[in-house]
Image: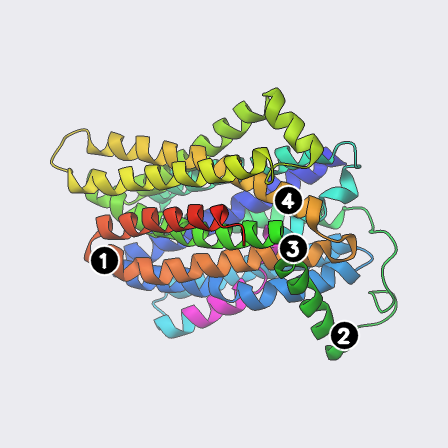
Amino acid sequence: MLTRYMAGAVMARTGDEMSGPALLVTGLAVTGSPLLASSVLAGLTVSAAVGGPLLGVLLDRARRPGRVLGWCLAGYAGGLLMVAGGMAGQVPGAVLVAVAVVTGLLGPALTGGWTAQLPLVAGPGRLARATAFDSMSYNVAGLAGPALVGVIASAGGGVMAVLVSVGMLVAALPAARGLPPAGPRPAGGEEGGAPGWRAVREEVRAGFRAIVSNGALRRATVASMVSCCGLAMVVVSAPVLGARLSGESGHGALLLAVVAAGGLVANAALSGTSRWAGAQAAGTAVEGVGTAMPVAGTAVQAVGTAVLGAGVVVMACSQTYWMAVVGAAVAGAGEGPQLTALFAVRHREAPARLRGQVFTTGASLKITSFAIGSAVAGPLAAYAVSLALLAGAALQAVAVAVLLVRR
């Protein structure tokens, strides 16, 4: 069952990781400007602030949460098809952004919604190791997604890359619908009838209170939001950076694959060390080893992002693209352990009855932060891509400061 869960998670997350770069490359090819592409990406992500908490309520109440995930996957895939088709048909940008906003409501299901179901397929004794593998699935998806976009976009264009992304999402449907049923739920769940609006509102508030009132959850959530905003600067800048350094925007998507590869290697190396494994088993991945690991990981991300920005400044050098590759690898080496630590603290601190909400709300806050970063990064990258990347490095430094603040 765990193997099937991981396979479905990798497929869904690969499709999700492909969708953003594919839309960016498509928009850049159609208009020649990063403004439309970044606006659509921002629309796809900004609505997660609303969708995440509501999806969390549905998942926490559902007797078969896998069916909820299945419907979300199908809806997200359909929305991507509409946006890509509209870009190819030169539909007005405002309409494309509106469709992206509606589609983005389902986005948290592909990230936090899957991870929240991990205890259903991994018992308490295997949860720590399963969490590490789950985190690696994000790295695998982050590696495969942009790499596939780079190859497919170079051969068949951005629209073809979007179609492959949709195929990945559809391929994950059987695994989602095959997830085991949840345990007993509070009265008013799926089998007891749809909850009223007042009950939904109270449960959403309870999910936010669970995050805000818990110091470890609060620090990890806020720091991940700021860090994700900085990561958006890299994602939006990557196609522009690739075109600037090598003449091919698809090479920018390959830089994102290098970021994911750095995270995968770092997580694999750390999971083999006794200190990291012991911290995971004891549930101290964010507190204890936990204070040092996310701080160090976020600081490494800042350094890698700064190296990417510096590569544009010195682009007269013939080896500048390889300098960007090194910066991407360093940034990824920090991102991987940071994500594993975040999942560990959520599994440890989230109340069982609100687990789905904590994960989807946390995911929605990160996605919304990504949307804000994307909206700001588009104009910055159009003006000077180095400025956008250095702004991303500064945001990672702010995230480090958040993790160090104890009150």
Q: Which residue is mark 4?
A: 345
Counting residues from the start of the chain, the first of labels 2 and 3 encountered is 2
Q: Tell me the mark number nearer the camera, choosing from 4 and 1.
A: 4
Whole-percent x, y for residue 144 in the image: 48, 36
Give the dominant element type of the magenta stretch: helix, strand or loop: helix
Q: Quadrant of residue 354?
A: bottom right
Mark 2 or 4, nearer chain start: 2
Amino acid type at mark 4: Val
Residue type, label 1? Ala
Spatial CA span between label 2 and label 1: 45 Å
- For the residues marked 2 and 3, what is the alpha-carbon distance in whole angstroms? 23 Å
On the image, the x and y values in percent for residue 151 come to: 38, 38
95 to 32, vertically: above or below: below
Secondary structure of the residue carrying tag 2 is helix
Quadrant of residue 68 within the rendered picture: bottom right
- On the image, the x and y values in percent for residue 147 come to 41, 37
